[in-house]
Image: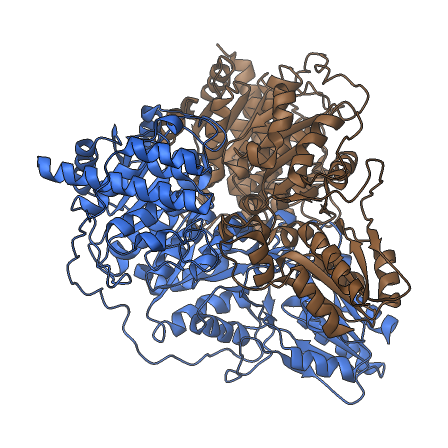
Chain colours: A blue, B brown
């Protein structure tokens, strides 16, 4: 039974938070006050009702409970919470949405209490799932992860991916708080105030659910108490709330999403709120001081052992590399989307099953979970077919605003996969990953470079994409060869070079084959292995541009946004023409060689192009 | 009660289909026989049990029932069906997966009975939903849409988007056939043979469900009969099946996904199948001959009526344009992802509510549904924030293999949206849409060009992306100005031009402002409105490159894959340097002007760059 004093105190805090919400949005002249007001009691009771455990002096502390605002537009509520906790002043709140303020329109990691940037809806639950996986299966710590969800965003499929996977992994440390305020951006949601509709659907996936009045402090406290009693089940607390609660003229009204009160409306609203006790502050209990479980013990990293004369697929080298480098990167974990026998993540899974997570065919949740793991200090390697990362581009895009440290490994690059046909061919993947700010895009051509680049990716702090190839490719390098992000290798070079051919993956091997044919005809070409597509080795490219008459890039990817345009951008002020061979016709099923010829990215096409341009 | 004769006949046909499945995959040396064998009875009974109505001489006939193989890897089963229907010969089947054959590894529209290309899982139900929407709300025809689903793919969130929206729209003409064969690509699915797990989850969303033995012909026939009795509810038939059914040594075994039988295994398998009656053929009843409802009557297209001195947001012009051009394009429909008051699709929705579909915050399903509508002859305009199309890139990507005729309109381009911050900013959208084969990417800068480009998009048969801007921008053109896909406008030009500045959207207005400042200093620049990013106006660009000393592109988009690289690609053999101003720093909240300055894409940055390079 909650004491009257506690209830009264929480009521005061909620009033103060409402004041803050209105203050900062009216001062900013924009923002989402109504979506914040609906969840005020939900969050005040979590933070200051004794449930949430957090050491505000150490926001990164591994024992802290985590809170993610999946409905990121309720950021005023988030900032109001921390102001009520004494961590932000009223003056801080007045910087909301202003240039340079950490209090951005939607939460970003510029504000240190933000666990992950949100604002594209339907992502918070996946991120929370990653943090909950970390607590239960990796760090083995009792922290809980809470996710504030909007009702509109429950339409996103990614939510249902998280719901099924959280249940599969029995994440009783994951608690969703669903703010059913009935109204979306432009009107009523699909289910309005039908709490049972949410309850029925969510519980059907094996979650514990609980419906209640989201503005009754005693009911909200009771809901959290119920949540803490869950065993082997994630919990969804489903609160009925009123959008704009506390300000009569915006309560439960259409047309008030993403709209701040004007000054005179603000004055009227404050009168309705009544007396605000600005001195009241909420207290957040500290978590226990526990140590995360030591991750896989260190140890010597073994050497590679590939026979020089035996072709190996780079995708297989990826799996081998994960196992080989784990001793050096004990925080490494692997996630795969039900294709580990194709991406070869299964090699790692078999060696270290406790560090592998089967994420099933649900790529959006997989990437969101990877972000959650990354924010808890892990180094997630996420694998699926390169084509299927397109499924999660919004999650990938948003993760860049959380300073994500995630490695994406996409297999089955390009038309060279052959008979399976275009649906399985990654042909836009380089374009998509290059467009992410400060991303790294790597594209190895043999097993040694693949392994080394996996290692470099693990060392690098940030978003890395590695493109691997389905077919086996011959060895190009000895086991001691060095590769760096931003590098390249000049594989054929002479003073007689008339053109430069740049390839990676299968096309590099085509370029080398073209070299042999042309050499016999007395035509010499320079051949470059452009294994780092972004950043790119400008120095080597400029050298080639000044030494030869033309540059020819060859890529198993559509013409836009990939290797060709990457080289064109690097040489934007070079007078030498840059010809790009790329996939330009609708691909189909066929043998890899047939398709390379058809798309004019084979050795024959290279030879033809070289002769044309020299 | 089904007669013994019917049952016996269906059994014979199923055996013949199994023979075809094994024959073509063994001949091809690859493919997915086991995933085909599990659903053989499910499909044989649909096609030849009297349920499916289809005029095979007229596959495009509007009255035909539609069948989509969401589990596209079961393509051998699809081809076997049509062979059993007498539409393919055994010799045709022997071309399966061979270069140039319409019988591709995963179904594509190269084969005329394929409604839409599939193969990336979890998309068929959305496509079917679009076709069912068309039947119920637009054409008003009694055709039904059937979707064959795999159990593994039920993990995709997009499925649950479709499930909730189909129920919302009461699509009793949409029938899912779920082939629960227990095994995914690399092992057991999340729910194995727990049919009740599927039934509970799917029915919780308001679907009618039915579980049965998917190999018992009488049970399968009963299931379809039950499906036809549904009212106002979509139906999911959930069949328990055995992967590899009919061939003992591959039945229900791991390691047999995506693997064809070797010749000797094939011979053993045929022995198990027993006597095959190759003369048996199934009959598909013809549909009724009904006319689709006439779409909105034609009529004169009104003229535009924008005052020359009043700024208008291009996103608003988009909404106006849809209403204005409908008489000319009566097949036009609009879909929006719960942001119609921001994209201004609401203008159309208010004018023509019966041609507008609210698709809620579920972008994947929205795009899949648009493909379904497109395949049924409609011209879907799909709108959301440009940033949120990243959510549906896999659906967009796959739609290109269905010859999709879809118009994507993405609002809130770039950092110029201001205070809402990076999560809402489209900064990778041009890169992503440019990478789609044969796509068109348009980027208007004022209301007139926006309206004209919407019209051009409607005329063009294919995938078009139109990028619109949040803020109001001044009028640049009179109402009679012409715009074409692949065109551009030279807005400032003189013989004294020293550099060319290319912009679109907000940056074009920055370029025009920079022009005025520079002119006062006696520096002349050429200014180009590059409203067609793809295809691009090479002629005008080459002229500018030969007339001026440098090209400067300015875009409110990340540096990779957008306008700058598009220009660099067009001028790949031009000696003039192409400098690209683009978003290169992590964006944040702030005023639009502050952000343009911060990212160095404002008039100030343009002036600085011009002075640097001339």
The number of callouts visible is 0
Residue under the image location 44 percent in, 33 percent down:
B241
Q: Position of residue B529 (x, y in %)?
A: 78, 52
Compared with B220, A537 (above or below) is below
Q: Residue A7 falls in which quadrant of the image?
A: top left
Can the viewer see residue B16?
A: no
Given residues A562 and B12, the one toward you in this image is A562
Compared with B539, A213 (above or below) is above
Can the viewer see residue B511?
A: yes
Q: Residue B373 falls in which quadrant of the image?
A: top right
* Residue occupying the far right of the picture: B495
Q: Quadrant of the C terminus of chain A?
A: bottom right
Q: Where is residue A301 in the image (x, y as percent from the top left)?
A: 37, 79
* Residue occupying the far bottom of the picture: A495
Q: Position of residue B209 (x, y in %)?
A: 42, 22
Residue B348 lies left or right of residue B485; in this view the side is: left
Residue A152 lies left or right of residue A446; in this view the side is: left
Residue under the image location 47 percent in, 61 percent down:
A344
Q: In which quarter of the image is the N terminus of chain A?
A: top left
């Amino acid at each position: 039974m909650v004491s009257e004093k506690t209830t009264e105190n929480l009521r005061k805090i909620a009033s103060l938070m409402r004041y803050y919400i209105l203050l900062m949005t009216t001062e900013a002249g924009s923002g989402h006050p109504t979506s914040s007001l609906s969840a005020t009691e939900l969050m005040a009771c979590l933070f200051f009702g004794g449930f949430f455990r957090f050491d505000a002096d150490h926001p990164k502390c591994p024992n802290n409970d985590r809170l993610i605002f999946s409905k990121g537009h309720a950021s005023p509520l988030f900032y109001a919470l921390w102001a009520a906790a004494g961590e932000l002043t009223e003056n801080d709140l007045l910087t909301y949405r202003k240039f340079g303020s950490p209090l951005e329109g939607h939460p970003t990691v510029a504000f240190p209490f933000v666990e992950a940037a949100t604002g594209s809806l339907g992502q918070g639950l996946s991120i929370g799932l990653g943090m909950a996986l970390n607590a239960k299966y990796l760090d083995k710590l009792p922290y809980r992860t809470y996710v504030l969800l909007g009702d509109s965003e429950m339409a996103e499929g990614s939510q249902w991916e998280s719901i099924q996977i959280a249940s599969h992994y029995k994440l009783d440390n994951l608690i969703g708080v669903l703010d059913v305020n009935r109204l979306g951006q432009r009107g009523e949601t699909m289910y309005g105030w039908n709490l049972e509709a949410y309850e029925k659907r969510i519980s059907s996936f094996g979650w514990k659910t609980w419906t209640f009045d989201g503005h009754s402090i005693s009911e909200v406290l009771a809901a959290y108490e119920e949540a803490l009693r869950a065993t082997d089940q994630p919990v969804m607390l489903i609160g009925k709330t009123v959008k704009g609660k506390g300000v009569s003229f915006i309560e439960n009204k259409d047309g008030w999403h993403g709209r701040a009160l004007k000054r005179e409306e603000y004055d009227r609203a404050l009168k309705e709120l009544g007396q605000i006790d600005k001195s009241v502050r909420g207290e957040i209990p500290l978590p226990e001081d526990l140590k995360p479980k030591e991750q896989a013990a260190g140890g010597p990293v073994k050497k590679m052992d590939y026979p020089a004369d035996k072709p190996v697929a780079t995708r297989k080298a990826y799996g081998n590399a994960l196992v080989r480098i784990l001793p050096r990167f004990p925080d490494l974990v692997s996630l795969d989307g039900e294709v580990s026998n194709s991406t070869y993540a299964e090699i790692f899974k078999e060696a270290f099953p406790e560090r592998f997570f089967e994420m099933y065919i649900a790529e959006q949740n997989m990437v969101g979970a990877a972000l959650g793991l990354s924010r808890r200090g892990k180094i997630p390697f996420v694998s699926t077919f390169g084509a299927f990362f397109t499924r999660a581009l919004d999650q990938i895009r948003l993760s860049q605003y959380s300073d994500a440290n995630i490695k994406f490994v996409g297999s089955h690059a390009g038309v060279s996969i052959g008979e399976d046909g275009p649906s399985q061919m990654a042909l836009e993947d380089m374009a998509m990953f290059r467009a992410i700010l400060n991303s790294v895009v790597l594209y190895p051509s043999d097993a040694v470079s693949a392994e080394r680049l996996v290692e470099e990716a693990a060392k690098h702090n940030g978003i890395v994409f590695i493109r691997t190839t389905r077919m086996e490719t011959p060895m190009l390098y000895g086991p001691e060869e060095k590769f760096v992000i931003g590098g390249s290798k000049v594989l054929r070079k002479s003073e007689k070079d008339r053109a430069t051919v740049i390839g990676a993956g299968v096309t590099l091997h085509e370029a080398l084959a073209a070299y042999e044919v042309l050499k016999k005809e007395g035509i010499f070409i320079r051949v470059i292995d452009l294994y780092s597509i972004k950043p790119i080795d400008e120095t080597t490219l400029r050298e080639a541009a000044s030494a030869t008459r033309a540059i020819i890039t060859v890529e198993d990817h559509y013409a836009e946004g990939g290797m060709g345009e990457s080289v064109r951008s690097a040489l934007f002020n070079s007078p030498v023409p840059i010809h790009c061979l790329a996939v330009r016709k609708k691909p189909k099923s066929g043998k890899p060689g047939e398709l390379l010829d058809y798309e004019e990215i084979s050795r024959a096409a290279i030879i033809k192009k070289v002769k044309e341009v020299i």
